[in-house]
Every structure is written in structure tokens, then in C-alpha cells.
Amino acid sequence: MTKNIMIVGVGGQGSLLASKLLGQILLSAGYDVKVSEVHGMSQRGGSVVTYVRFGDKVYSPVIDKGEADYIVSFELLEAARYVGFLKPGGRNHGRG
């Protein structure tokens, strides 16, 4: 079974670093891991989204709407922006 985690924030908050560290931890625990990132205007405080997918076998790094098990947010506005990606019963963890 594949688990899907989105880490969202704005440029400079450490979202990319957090996703890379999480990916390494999951890889060392024996999972197949795919990490992908979207960071258009991140240098100017723009939206940054990273996808971390792990499980026995993961074929795609992208999480579609309604598929995220967890959203970890470093910015409250970004949590609100991506809440539609949560699956029923998914969890949104953020600060704000």
C-alpha cells in the first residue's frame, strides 16, 4: 500500500529540505520512495509543494487531488490552498 504525504509552504521555510530528509529516512527504512517538488516563485516567498510517496512499490511521484494521506504545512494559507488534495480521512498538520 502506498502512502502519500504533501509538504507545503513558501520559499525559504525548508519545505524542500524536509521532503528530502523524509525521503531519505523512508528509503533507509526499506520503502520504495518517490519525491517530487514544485517551486515556481519560491525564491520570492511563493508557493512550494513537495510530494513524498512511499510503499512497497511506487510508480509515480505525483499526488493528485483526493489522494494525500497527510499534508504537512509550514504556512496556514498553503494548508488551505491544498486541503482539496486530502483523501477522506486524511490529516492536515500545520502551523499557524
Image: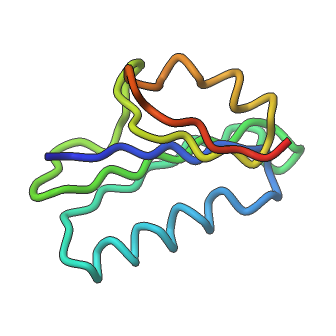
- Position of 3 relative to 47 (above/below): below
**Residue 76: where, in percent of width, then height?**
80, 34
Residue 91 lies left or right of residue 41; in this view the side is left
> Residue, x 35% and y 37% (percent of image)?
62
Quadrant of the rendered image containing residue 69: top left
Which quarter of the figure is the C terminus placed in?
Answer: top right
**Residue 63: where, in percent of width, then height?**
37, 33
Which residue is more in the foreground, 59 or 54? 54
How many marks the image carries: the answer is 0
Which residue is more in the foreground, 95 or 50? 95
> Residue, x 80% and y 41% (percent of image)?
75
Quadrant of the rendered image containing residue 80: top right
> Which residue in the rendered view is the most extreme toward the bottom?
28
> Residue, x 64% and y 42% (percent of image)?
8
**Residue 86: where, in percent of width, then height?**
46, 25
Residue 94 lies left or right of residue 23; in this view the side is right
- Position of 26 relative to 87 (above/below): below
**Colour option used:** rainbow
> Residue, x 47% and y 68% (percent of image)?
22
- Position of 25 relative to 92 (above/below): below
